Amino acid sequence: MSLMPDSWIRGMARDSAMIEPFVENQRREGVISYGLSSYGYDARVADEFRIFTNVNSAVVDPKAFSEDSFVERKADVCIIPPNSFALARTVEYFRIPRDVLVICLGKSTYARCGIIVNVTPLEPEWEGHVTLEFSNTTPLPARVYANEGACQFLFLKGAAPPEVSYADRAGKYMRQTGVTLPKL
């Protein structure tokens, strides 16, 4: 596997609409940085948030997930309660090539504040808005800023395409838009 550089990411965004909208240069003036970097792409978090709450005494169950676990917010800033987390999505829509696997890492600016971003790998031929999890590991409320950098995606090109891609198996999160909750 090879880690793909900025020139490859730019070309795939331009020629194959791999990332839309695509920001060709790193933006950082007064914001948490986003856009194309040397070996990755720093995606932005949209202004749609689902913040976990315990007001309805719901149980978190991945096999029978209840929307009662969340409070929905559309805002420029999301405040995540202490020791809690929120779901959000990327501004960018991704279309992953058949011979590529994408791994996500959190931004150091958030990590240094105790805010961890988690995303599972984007599999070959998956497409959609990426659902992001922001975990606030601190005993204090934490802010996440919409339309600013949230995480960096690294593109790993395989030696050959897989026999079966995410699209081939009709993955349950294919072409997701908005903040997508767990599915069984």
Image: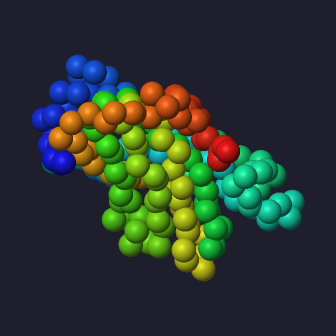
Instruction: Name the residue nearer the viewer: 122 or 99.
Output: 99
Residue 5's place in the image compared with 114, above or below, is above
Instruction: Name the residue nearer the viewer: 40 or 143.
Output: 40
Q: Residue furthest top?
A: 15
What residue appears at the point 47 percent right and 65 percent down from the top-left corner? 116
Q: Residue furthest right?
A: 56
Q: Is residue 53 visible?
A: yes
Residue 31 pos. (x, y %):
36, 51
What residue appears at the point 53 percent right and 34 percent down from the top-left corner? 171
Residue 26 pos. (x, y %):
24, 44
Residue 99 pos. (x, y %):
26, 34
Residue 104 pos. (x, y %):
37, 52
Relative to residue 30, is residue 113 drawn left or right?
right
Relative to residue 27, is residue 46 drawn left or right?
right
Q: Is residue 23 visible?
A: no
Residue 159's place in the image compared with 143, above or below, is above
Q: For the image shown, how many numbered marks are present on the structure?
A: 0
Q: Residue furthest bottom?
A: 139
What residue appears at the point 54 percent right and 55 percent down from the top-left corner? 133
- The answer to which image quadrant residue 82 occupies is bottom right
What residue appears at the point 18 percent right and 48 percent down from the top-left corner? 1
Instruction: Name the residue nearer the viewer: 100 or 168.
Output: 168
**Colour treatment of the image:** rainbow
Classify the position of the C terminus by image quarter. top right
